[in-house]
Image (cartoon, rainbow, N blue to C red):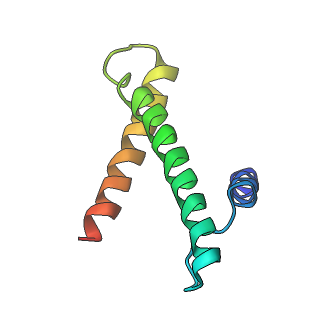
Amino acid sequence: MSDKMTIYNVVCKLVGAIDPIGETQTDDRRFENLKTMADLVDKLLFDITRVANNKHARIEYSMKRAGEFADNFLNETKECLDERE
């Protein structure tokens, strides 16, 4: 778990703050950071979806395990996003 948090912290440090504060110059910079973060998340979700699509296509235990984990992650993420509406 600490490795995941370390990666998260590194990404946040590299991308920069994304929350607007109501000051135009700062918020413009943070908006660009937000777009960078969204692009990264899009690419990560694409990769995870590719792994999830293997859950039924392959018979190898390790590939099914990874596919099922990825599929569960995507389903939980969808449920979380659906609750926002």
Residue drawn at (66%, 68%) of the image = 17
Residue drawn at (31%, 54%) of the image = 78
Q: For this view, does 11 lie left or right of residue 45?
A: right
Name the outermost residue toward the bottom. 22
Instruction: Locate the C terminus and report the quarter of the image it occupies.
Output: bottom left
Residue drawn at (29%, 59%) of the image = 79
Name the outermost residue toward the front. 25
Q: For this view, does 59 lie left or right of residue 19?
A: left
Judging depth in this view, the residue of 59 and 75 nearest the camera is 75
Judging depth in this view, the residue of 39 and 47 nearest the camera is 39
Residue 18 visible to the viewer: no
Q: Quadrant of residue 31?
A: bottom right
Residue 7 image point, x, y percent: 72, 51
Judging depth in this view, the residue of 8 and 14 nearest the camera is 14
Q: For this view, does 62 lie left or right of residue 71?
A: right
Q: For this view, does 72 lie left or right of residue 31?
A: left
Residue 84 image point, x, y percent: 29, 71
Instruction: Locate the N terminus and report the quarter of the image it occupies.
Output: bottom right
